[in-house]
Image: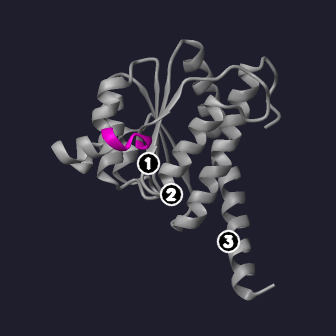
Amino acid sequence: MSDWLTTQLDEHVAVAEATATTLADDIRTVGRLVCDRLARGGVVYTFGNGGSAADAQHLAGELIGHYKRDRRPLPAVTLSTDASVMTCIANDYSYEDVFSRQVRALARPDDVVIAFTTSGRSPNVVAALAAGQAGGATTVLFAGGDGGPARVHADHALLVPSKSTQRIQEMHTLMLHVISEIVDAWAAGEEPTA
């Protein structure tokens, strides 16, 4: 195996172990929170930029589709998937407003607003979390390091203990899979295996 690949794998394992040590309880808490809000009739709204937008879509897909079990679809929306709305808001207002206007229009107190960002510094993500809190929704931040300015507007922050974009995104996938397992089991009336 090349030295480069070995280094990447070693870093991945180290960050995964640190994430498990520092965030296991918080990940389970967020999974149970999502179940609680869905049980109350809430909706999960997800968003992010670039690779984080893909993570946001991934989580929504697991909720609407299913993770491992045949069960009812759960209400989830990824705010970055509607190109017409995104470009309308960006053109008529600003790119900073593309998620916050949607959150203000859609999110209600029993809903969960989930942001994915590696740094926590994207102005459009920070603004959307602030809008979610102001509207009474529960806000969740998937980020790395200290969570940046977005951390201030997160009721729950899953902060990967790393500054590496690659490692943070890898842990976001791991965490969204654990949360998907918890929610999937709840929706199917089973105990989670995670």
Numbered badge on residue 51: 2
Please report the residue visible at 72 percent of the width from the left and 58 percent of the height from the top.
17
Q: Position of residue 146 (x, y in %)?
A: 45, 55
Does residue 58 appear left or right of residue 150 in this picture?
right
Is residue 136 at least partly visible in the picture?
Answer: yes
The residue lying furthest to the top in this view is: 40
User: Callout 2: few (<14), some (14-19), or many (20+) C-alpha neighbours within 10 Å?
Assistant: some
Q: CA distance from mark 1 to mark 2?
A: 8 Å
Q: Nearer the viewer, residue 136 or 83?
A: 83
Q: Amino acid at mark 1?
A: Gly
Which residue is at the far bottom? 3
- The correct choice, above or below, for 126 with respect to 32 in the image is below
Q: Residue at x 65, y 36 (%)?
A: 62
Q: Which residue is mark 1?
A: 48
Q: Earlier in the sequence, mark 3 or mark 2?
A: 3
Q: Are marks 1 and 2 in contact (CB under 8 Å)?
A: yes
The quadrant of the rendering that contains the N terminus is bottom right
Left or right: residue 64 versus residue 147 is right
What residue is shown with label 3? 11
